[in-house]
């Protein structure tokens, strides 16, 4: 499989090159040259397949022969060693829980898959790769955990000081080893800007092989398509049309769902549910895309004003606005609505949703499910990751799972960075 740049001004590359580079030299996102639907027999017997087999069949065309079958199956087995249950909430609504991995947010699968691919491609290469990543919350922890101890790879995580939850901060600042955390005096956009600038700065790229572990990287983005297949496997016997509502920030997760649909997965409609960062919602109303500065909300992992993967979604619909509108809707909900939804879900179904999941639930409400439809909202993080807000909103105490308890008592180690110059000094000296 070859990948081309969505800016159409760079050479095509192989899977491994796209993973190592992260982004094309013309700054475009990489996109697969073709997407070939899986045979209908795959979906006919999906309930008989285990997660590794489903994932292998779904991803193999994207990896090609660059990782041998046995190795790729091992990687997938290792990456997918936890559950992805659909939990019923209401008669025609369920939530797909994606938080049973080591950092309790859905990014674990993508981060672990990318780490293991990079490790494989790098095993005969003596030059270190530096993974540079900006995080608004959960990416940092998932990438830190996924890459911990991976040979030949150093990880540098930039996060906005005071803008991530206590648990999120501990998850990315307490591991040490090949993981370094930089605490940036600013907001997420400032972290993102530093990362973007670094990729263009030859005084850095001459001495460091940089790659990105944000969902622009195909190895972070594509494995997320497994979730939608795992949900279908569990819901198939309901014989209803499935509507997915995906709490969206950078739109990588929902975009992967649309890839699953292109592979033949039966999906009636995709709903992108956002917080007040409503760039795409406005676009769907006006067909004019205007990036905005990101706004801070209680669903902070979705505080993105210029979602990088939206261009991939447009590409999946051949940049045809009408075709996009037929299969995809976007709705935005503010913090008050989000808190109210958390309360409603708890009161009606005795289920504790985190703020991101609650935004997903609201997406289904606004969509308005029909009789023959079943709605699935993705629960992208465990409520404990947003402990303060969940406990205050629902007036409860949340039990802390062992994965999280492990980091609670560890000491934070981070370096404060005020601006790009300080960042540069740091990165070239390490
Ligand atoms: C990253 C994240 C999102 C947003 O996912 P995208 O793929 O960027 O749209 C939603 N919820 C949680 C908890 C996240 O960590």
Image: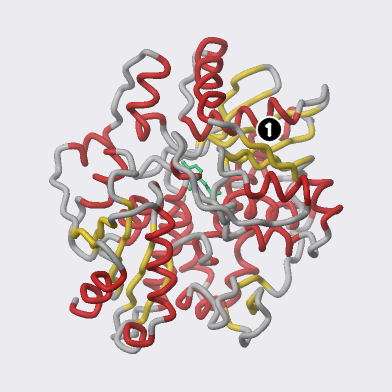
Task: State the residue lying farthest toward the right.
Answer: 322
- Is 176 left, or right, of 290 in this rendering? left
Residue at horizontal 75 percent and vertical 45 percent from the top: 328
Q: Nearer the viewer, residue 365 or 35?
A: 365
- Is 194 left, or right, of 244 in this rendering? left
Q: Nearer the viewer, residue 426 or 235?
A: 426
Please tell me in which quadrant of the rendered image residue 126 appears: bottom left
Q: Quadrant of the C terminus?
A: bottom left
> Could you tell me residue 179's position as x and y percent?
24, 62
Q: Nearer the viewer, residue 290 or 315?
A: 290
- Is 257 left, or right, of 285 in this rendering? left
Q: Quadrant of the N terminus?
A: bottom right
Task: State the residue lying farthest toward the top.
Answer: 347
* Residue 161 visible somewhere in the drawing: yes
Please tell me in which quadrant of the rendered image residue 147 appears: bottom left
Please tell me whether residue 325 is drawn above or below residue 334 in the rendered image: below
> Could you tell me residue 148's position as x and y percent?
27, 60
* Residue 1 visible somewhere in the drawing: no
Give the labeled residue for mark 1: 235
> Could you tell me residue 111's position as x and y percent?
42, 57
């Amino acid at each position: 499989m070859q990948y081309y740049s969505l800016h159409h001004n760079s050479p095509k590359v192989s899977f491994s090159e796209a993973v190592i580079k992260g982004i094309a030299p013309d700054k475009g996102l990489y996109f697969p040259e073709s997407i070939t639907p899986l045979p209908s027999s795959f979906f006919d017997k999906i309930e008989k397949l285990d997660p590794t087999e489903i994932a292998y069949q779904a991803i193999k065309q994207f990896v090609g022969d660059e990782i041998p079958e046995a190795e790729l199956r091992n990687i997938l087995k290792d990456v997918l060693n936890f559950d992805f249950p659909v939990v019923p909430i209401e008669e025609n609504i369920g939530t797909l829980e994606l938080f049973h991995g080591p950092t309790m947010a859905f990014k674990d699968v993508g981060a672990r898959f990318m780490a293991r691919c990079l490790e494989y491609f790098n095993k005969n290469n003596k030059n270190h790769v530096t993974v540079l990543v900006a995080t608004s919350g959960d990416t940092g922890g998932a990438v830190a955990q996924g890459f911990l101890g991976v040979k030949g790879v150093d990880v540098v995580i930039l996060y906005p000081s005071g803008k991530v939850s206590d648990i999120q901060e501990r998850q990315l600042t307490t591991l040490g080893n090949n993981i370094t955390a930089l605490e940036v005096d600013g907001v997420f956009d400032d972290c993102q800007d530093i990362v973007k600038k670094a990729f263009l700065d030859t005084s850095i790229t001459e001495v460091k092989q940089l790659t990105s572990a944000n969902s622009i990287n195909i190895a972070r983005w594509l494995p997320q398509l497994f979730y939608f297949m795992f949900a279908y496997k569990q819901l198939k016997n309901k014989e209803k049309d499935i509507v997915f509502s995906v709490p969206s920030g950078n739109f990588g997760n929902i975009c992967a769902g649309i890839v699953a649909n292109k592979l033949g997965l039966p999906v009636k409609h995709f709903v992108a549910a956002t917080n007040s960062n409503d760039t795409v919602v406005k676009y769907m109303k006006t067909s004019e895309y205007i990036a905005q500065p990101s706004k801070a909300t209680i669903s902070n992992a979705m505080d993105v004003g210029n979602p990088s993967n939206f261009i991939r979604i447009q590409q999946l619909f051949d940049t045809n606005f009408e075709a996009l509108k037929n299969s995809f809707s976007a709705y935005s909900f503010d913090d008050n609505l989000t808190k109210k939804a958390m309360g409603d879900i708890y009161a009606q179904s005795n289920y504790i949703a985190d703020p991101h999941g609650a935004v997903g639930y609201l997406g289904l409400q606004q969509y308005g499910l029909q009789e023959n439809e079943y709605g699935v909202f993705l629960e992208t993080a465990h409520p404990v990751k947003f402990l303060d807000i969940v406990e205050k909103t629902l007036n409860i105490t949340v039990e802390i799972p062992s994965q999280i308890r492990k980091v609670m008592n560890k000491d934070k180690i981070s370096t404060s960075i005020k601006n790009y110059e300080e960042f540069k000094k740091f990165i070239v000296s390490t």
